[in-house]
Image (tube, helix red, strand yellow):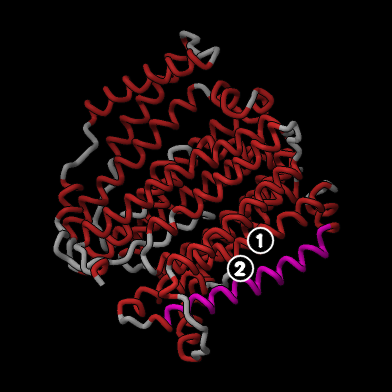
């Protein structure tokens, strides 16, 4: 079991870099697909596509009943003991659960498609999208169970490549339909479902042909199933709460407004969250590292790590966010098309604030999990879920897309404050208020200059030129403010000789 005896630094860096590589590949593919749809579909059809997809994405979270993460947790333990029969049984139980629930959900959705299209989506085309996406739902259950198995086997190059393969196939099929001048929403749905079908077949082949040593005959182990269920139940409960918080915006926009508003929201939020392409994959480094440091009592190192995160994460978010805030119309127009600029400019400027809090909240959540604050995280999630229902329902019903974005700002802000408070009881950190003030003044100064001198790019080349100048100015700000701390690297390298904690599961649907 050589791969289990590598020092922590080697395991984290090797596995993390593989995950980062495929994450960086996947994000541009996802953006490219959105750009294609936004430029070839009407606002209503674009919104309808993502409204229906959001329904399925929410159900996918509940599809494995928590057994997926349970499989990823137990497989490494039995693999380390050389118990391959239990490894395969765990995978088989997860696969049966996921396939069974996906079939059950699909049958319900199939027979209620007409009603959902007329009452919830308020568009008859949604009925046919639901039929097509049922194929995606079922095939995704196979992909998900295989991904959990390879995660447990710590085959980073396989499980982290699944999302990239799926998105690449979706984009290729969609470009095929676009090339032959059939860019209709139903064909894009076919491209999505067809890509997942092919991906499921491809990775099933990889499992049975390339890793046949773990493919055994499934046997019934009541004790093992009980262990998986005991781990799965609280995991499902916690995940359900966080999923509910994330999905309420699309749900209330679809329920109270129309799919047109969903379309605008689905354009605005990806632009505002573009810094996540770099920040969220890197987040996977910190769970095993924080867990290790907490176990070994490395409080000073955790403090350095926390202080560095509190500066670097907002700085990366600000680099992208400030530039988009300065030129929101130009950014929307260049990326998604001019038809979105009038509806999306104001929501996008507000959504930039969401990205600041959501990026920090994501890291705080990882740190809280790494230091064992499971129950407190659950309490915070319950509180946020209740507040989110109230705020989102009222604001979205009254103000539509703007209300959804404002609700997201408030919820993410509360998340940062609450998680920060419980973390501070263990890691006595302080927010770098002076640095945040400098960053805010820097943003205000740039905004004032661009408005006073009426600076705005009029074409793609000017946009790139403005971006280059802005990058140089931002680099000067970094040299003056000096947010980086060399001790964060010493924190990572100090754990060279310790045993590893397996890297966390990077869920592509979260």
Q: Is residue 136 visible?
A: yes
Q: Do labels 1 and 2 touch, CB within 8 Å?
A: yes
Answer whether residue 42 is visible to the viewer in this image. no
Using the image, determine if residue 477 lies above or below residue 75: above
Q: Which residues are magenta?
A: 86-113
Specify whether 303 is left or right of 144. Answer: left
Work out whether 161 lies above or below 500: above
- Observer-nearest residue: 353 or 150? 150
Which badge, 1 or 2, is on the more N-terminal residue?
2
Q: Report which residue position mark 2 lands on.
A: 63
Cα distance in 3D space between marks 1 and 2? 9 Å
Q: Residue at x 49, y 48 (%)?
A: 164
Give the crowd class for mark 2: few <14, some 14-19, many >=20 residues within 10 Å: many
Q: Percent x, y for residue 148?
A: 47, 67
Residue 116, by quadrant, is bottom right
Q: Which residue is mark 1?
A: 137
Name the spot of residue 12 as percent of width and height, x first. Answer: 27, 57
Asked whether 52 or 206 is in front, the reply is 206
């Amino acid at each position: 079991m050589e791969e289990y005896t590598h020092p922590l630094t080697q395991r984290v860096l090797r596995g993390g870099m593989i995950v980062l590589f495929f994450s960086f590949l996947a994000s541009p593919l996802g953006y490219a697909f959105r750009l294609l749809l936004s430029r070839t579909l009407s606002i209503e059809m674009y919104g309808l596509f993502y409204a229906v997809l959001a329904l399925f994405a929410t159900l996918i979270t509940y599809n494995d009943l928590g057994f997926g993460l349970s499989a990823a947790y137990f497989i490494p333990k039995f693999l380390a003991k050389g118990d391959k029969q239990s490894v395969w049984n765990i995978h088989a139980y997860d696969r049966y659960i996921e396939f069974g629930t996906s079939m059950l959900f699909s049958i319900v959705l199939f027979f209620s498609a007409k009603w959902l299209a007329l009452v919830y989506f308020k568009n008859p085309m949604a009925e046919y999208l639901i039929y097509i996406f049922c194929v995606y739902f079922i095939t995704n259950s196979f992909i998900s169970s295989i991904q959990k198995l390879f995660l447990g086997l710590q085959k980073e190059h396989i499980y982290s490549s699944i999302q990239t393969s799926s998105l690449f196939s979706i984009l290729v099929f969609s470009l095929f339909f676009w090339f032959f001048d059939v860019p209709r929403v139903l064909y894009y749905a076919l491209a999505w479902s067809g890509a997942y079908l092919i991906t499921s077949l491809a990775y099933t082949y990889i499992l049975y042909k390339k890793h046949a040593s773990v493919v055994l005959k499934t046997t019934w182990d009541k004790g093992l199933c009980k262990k998986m269920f005991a781990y799965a139940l609280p995991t499902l409960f916690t995940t359900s709460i966080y999923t509910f918080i994330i999905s309420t915006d699309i749900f209330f926009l679809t329920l109270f407004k129309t799919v047109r508003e969903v379309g605008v929201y689905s354009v605005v939020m990806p632009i505002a969250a573009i810094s996540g392409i770099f920040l969220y994959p890197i987040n996977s480094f910190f769970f095993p590292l924080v867990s290790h440091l907490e176990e070994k009592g490395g409080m000073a190192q955790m403090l350095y790590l926390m202080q560095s995160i509190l500066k670097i994460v907002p700085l990366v978010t600000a680099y992208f966010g400030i530039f988009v805030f300065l030129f929101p119309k130009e950014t929307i127009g260049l990326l998604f098309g001019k038809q979105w600029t009038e509806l999306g400019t104001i929501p996008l400027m507000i959504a930039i604030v969401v990205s600041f809090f959501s990026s920090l909240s994501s890291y705080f959540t990882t740190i809280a999990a790494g230091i064992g604050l499971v129950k407190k995280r659950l309490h915070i999630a319950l509180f946020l879920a209740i507040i989110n229902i109230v705020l989102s329902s009222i604001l979205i019903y009254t103000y539509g897309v703007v209300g959804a974005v404002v609700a997201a700002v408030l919820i993410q802000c509360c998340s940062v404050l609450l998680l920060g408070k419980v973390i501070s009881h263990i890691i006595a950190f302080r927010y770098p208020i002076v640095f945040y003030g400098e960053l805010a003044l820097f943003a205000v100064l740039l905004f004032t200059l661009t408005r006073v001198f009426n600076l705005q790019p009029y074409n793609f080349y000017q946009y790139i030129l403005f971006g280059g100048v802005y990058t140089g100015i931002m680099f000067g700000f970094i040299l003056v403010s000096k947010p980086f701390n060399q001790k964060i690297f010493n924190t990572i390298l100090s754990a060279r000789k310790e045993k590893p904690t397996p890297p966390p599961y990077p869920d592509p649907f979260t």
